[in-house]
Image (cartoon, rainbow, N blue to C red):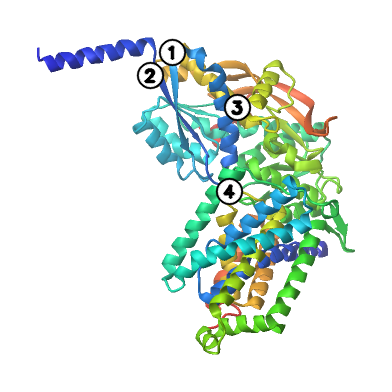
Amino acid sequence: MNPFKWLGAAALGLALSAGAQAANVKIGIMLPFSGVNADLGDANIKGMELFLKLHAKDIAPHTIEIVKRDEGPPSGANAKTVATELITNDKVKMIVGVVFSPSAIAMAPVVTQAKVPLLISNAGTAWITQLSPYIARVSFSMWHDGYPMGTFAAKDLKCKTAAMGYTDFPPGKDSTESFKTGFEKAGGQVIDAIPMGNPAQVPDMTPFFQRVKDKKPDCFYVFIPSGNHASAVVKAYGEVGLKQAGIKLIGPKDVVPDTKLQDMGDAAIGTIVMSNYAADLDNAQNKEFVKAWHDAYGANSNPDFMSAAAWDAMAATFAVIKKLDGNLDDPEKVMAALKGWSTNGPRGKVSIDPETRDVVNDEWALEVIKKPDGKLGTKVLGSIKDVKDECKALKVGRCGGK
Amino acid sequence: MSASAIVSILFDGLAYAMVLFIISVGLSITMGLMGFVNLAHGAFAMAGGYLVVSLTKSLGVPFLPALIIAAVVVGAASIPFERLLYSRLYKATELDQVLLTIGLAFMAIASYTYFYGPAPLTVPLPSFLTGQIDIGVRTVPAYRAFTIVVGAVLIALLWYGFERTNIGAKIRAAVDNRRMAQSVGINVDRLFTLTFALGSGLAAFGGGLAIQTFGLTPSFAVLYLVFFLIIVSVGGLGSLKGTLVASVLLGVFDIGGKYLYSDAGGFFIYVLTVLVLLIKPAGLYGRE
C-alpha cells in the first residue's frame, strides 16, 4: 500500500473515532445585528449567549461552535445569501434565530434544498412552518397572541368595536387577521384597518392614531415589529390622547416588550397584551432566568419575549445535540428530535407540536401597571393553557395549504 | 372629511414641517452657496439628538437649554470638519463630495452605535410638553404645538437674519453669484464656514426636536436623508422661502396622505416631488 494513502486513511480513521466521542457541533445563528432593528438581534443573542454561558457543560463531551451572521434588513433581502453562506461555506448543521418573517420566507427554499434544519427563535408569520419540512419554531405564531386577544377583547374587555393598526409586512397582516377572526367570532366588529408604514423605518405614528381617535372604537389593536416601533406606538398613544378618549390600546406582546417598557413611561400603563412571556411572570424558571440576566447584563437591562424564546431555542438545540449524541449529520433525525421536544423554561411549559413543527405554549393576558417600586410591570389578567397555532387548526388562508 | 380631521392634518402636518424645515434649511443653504452635496448633514442632526439625550439624562439639563447647547456645540464642532475635510473638496467633482460625506455619515452611524448602542433612545420632557392642550376645535398634542411655536420663532429669526442684516445680505449675494460676491470683496470662504456651522447647529437643534417625533437611533443619519434632500430639491437650492414652502407642503401632504389613505403610505409625497420637479426642475424657488 502506498504509504501516503495509508497515512491518510489512518488520519481519517483517527478523526472519525475522535468525532464519535466528542463532536464539535457547528450551529449558525442568524439575527439582525445591524441597522434600525439591531436591538431585536441584541435581545435575542443575549438570551442565547446567556444559555450558552450557563449550560455549555450540559452537552459534554461535545462542544458547540456558534457562527453568528447578520440577518440584515427586515425585508429579508440578505437572508437567502447569508443562509446559503452558512450552509455551503461554514457547513453548519443547523441554523437558529431569524427575527423577521420575510427572512424566514426567503430562506425556506434554501434550507429545504440543502436539508439543513432551521429553528426559528422569533419570526412569527403563521404559515412559515409550512414552507419547509426542515423548519421548526420555538417562538410563536402571530395567531398565538392575536386570536385569543380577539376573544379576550370582546368577552373580557367588553369591546364592541375595534380598529386595527399594523406594520405593513407579512406578520402584520397575519396578526390583524388572527385578531379579527377571534374578535368577530366573539361578536365584536372591526371598523378600521390601518397599515402603518414598513418595518425598516419607524414612522411618525400620530396621523394613524388621530384617525383612530376620530373613528372612536372601543379598542385599538396594534401590531408592530416590537423594538423602536413599540416605543413610537406607546408614545403616540399618550400624545394623541387615546386613553383619555376611552380607547384601549391592545395587541400582541410586541407592543410592550420588557426591553423597552421602562423607557415608555406612564403612557404605557393600562395597555393590555396577549403574550407568552413577561419578565414579571411568576414561575421559578423565569425568576432564575431574570436573575441570571441581571447578573450578566446589569440591573437596568431586562429580557423580553424575544430573549426568552431565544433561550428556549438554545435549550432545544442542546436537547437535540444530547439526544443525537453530537451527531447532527442526518437532518431527518434532527427534525425528529425537535418534533415533540418540550422544556420548562422562562415561558413555562413549551413544546413543539410534532404535527405542525410549531410551538405550543401557555398564553397570558397582561396589563401594564405601575409597580410599588415605581417601575412599570405587568399584571396577569387571565391565562390559557397549551395554545396551538389556531391558523393551522382553522386552515385560514395560506395556513390551509399543505 | 370632518372639520376635526382637517384640523388634525394641518396641525400635525405643520408640526412635522417645522422639524423638517429646521433640519433641512442648513443643507439647502450650504448646497446653494457652495454647490456642495453634504450627505453627512443628517449625521449632524443626529449628533444634536444624542447630545440632547446625554445632557438631559446624564447631566440633568432641562430639555430647552439642552436643545440650545446642542445646537451651539454641534455648530462649533462642525467648523473643524468644514475646514479640514470639506474645504478640500469644494472644487472636486460631486461624486467625490458624495463619497466623502456619505462615508462620514456611515462613520457616524458606527461610532454612535458603539457608544450609545443600537437601541432607540428617548428624552425626558418637561411635564408641560407631555399630554394634550385644547386649541378650541379639538385637543392637540402639546409637544406638536411646542414644535410649531419653536419653528415659527426660528423662521422669524432666520428671515430677519437673511433679509435685514449685513451678513444675510452677503450670504444672499454669494448664493446668487459667488464670483461677483468675491470680486466685491466678500470673503466667501469665511462666509461658508459660518453658514455651514449655522446650518449644522440648526440641524442639531432639529435633531433634538425630532427625537420625540422620529425617534433616535444611530441610523437617523441616513434614514431621513432622502426626506431632507427632497425638501431641498423641491424648495430650490439656497432658498429659505423655498425650504419653508417645501417643508410645509411635504409635511402636510405626508400626514394627510397617511391619515386619509393609509394604504398608499408615503406615496403622496413622492408624487408631489415628481410633479414639482417636472414643472420646475430647479425647485419651487430655485434659480433656473
The chain holding disc 1 is A
Q: Nearer the viewer, mark 4 or mark 2?
A: 4
CA distance for labels 1 and 2: 9 Å
Say which residue label 2 marks.
Answer: A330
Is residue B158 at all visible to an observer of this figure? Answer: yes
Q: Find residue A203 and name its label.
A: none
Q: Nearer the viewer, mark 1 or mark 2?
A: 1
Q: Nearer the viewer, residue A373 or A207?
A: A373
Q: Nearer the viewer, residue A32 or B171?
A: B171
Amino acid type of the residue tagged 2 in the rendering: Asp
The chain holding disc 3 is A
Residue at image location 64% in from the left, 41% down from the top: A227
Amino acid type of the residue tagged 3 in the rendering: Ala
Q: Are marks 1 and 2 in contact (CB under 8 Å)?
A: yes
As helix, strand or loop, the secondary structure at mark 2 comes to loop
Q: Nearer the viewer, mark 3 or mark 4?
A: 4
CA distance for labels 1 and 4: 44 Å
Say which residue label 4 marks.
Answer: B112
As helix, strand or loop, the secondary structure at mark 3 comes to helix
The chain holding disc 2 is A
Query: Does residue A326 appear to the left or right of B132 in the view shown?
Result: left
Query: Does residue B128 appear to the left or right of B175 in the view shown?
Result: right
Q: Earlier in the sequence, mark 3 or mark 2?
A: 3
